[in-house]
Amino acid sequence: MQRLIPLVYGELRQLAARQLRDERPDHTLSPTSLVHEAFLRLTGHATVSWESRSHFFGVAAQAMRRILVDHARRRTAQKRGRQNQITLDAEVEASLPTTSQDVLGVDEALERLALLDPRQARVVELRYFVGLSIEETADVLGTSIATVKRDWMVARAWLQRELSPER
């Protein structure tokens, strides 16, 4: 882990900054704290043998997602806010969660999607919660760009339906 941190820290910090860019202004997590918390979670487990760069970033993406969801749950428990409708636009940057309710809603829908199609759920997790590009997501999942594009398109439509206020 000591050798790994200098190699991946900058890239993880950029991913965290991208993820938090559209959060509310008073968000208490900074990109640095998100990365540090992810590292703590990654190193808090038994020794992991990283198979590849993609494997590491896949596990780091899951850790970041869990941190953001846990943070949103704590905030929601402290202060009940109104639920906003969220959209899953073609551009990830335009659809990042902006409230605790958004993060929790997407997380709950993502859990349901994972039961139907685990790969689509991973695509959404990597793109939505971590902000990876289509190409980066394909690399992490070890699949083709075309497959990721297709999964992203189908998963977005499914999640849009699941998260609509009319449902």
Image: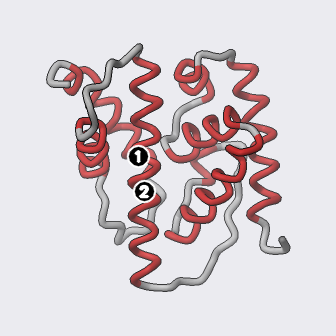
Q: Is residue 156 left or right of residue 74?
A: right
Nearest the eye: 43 or 146:
43
Outermost residue, left side: 2
- Image position of 7 with respect to 111: above or below: above
The residue labelled by disc 2 is 68
Q: Quadrant of the rendered structure where residue 121 is?
A: top right
The residue labelled by disc 1 is 64
Position of the C terminus, as image quadrant, is bottom right
Q: Is residue 9 left or right of residue 61?
A: left
Q: Amino acid at mark 1?
A: Met
Instruction: Name the residue located 20 percent from the left edge and 25 percent from the top edge.
Output: 1
SS for callout 1: helix
Indicate the position of residue 156 as horizontal and vertical percent values.
75, 46
User: Circle 2: is it few (<14), some (14-19), or many (20+) Cα within 10 Å?
Assistant: many
Q: Quadrant of the rendered structure where residue 142 is?
A: top right
| Mark 2 vs mark 1, CA separation in Å | 6 Å
Q: Is residue 21 left or right of residue 34?
A: right
Q: Is residue 7 left or right of residue 137?
A: left
Instruction: Name the residue located 39 percent from the left edge and 72 percent from the top edge.
Output: 74
SS for callout 2: helix
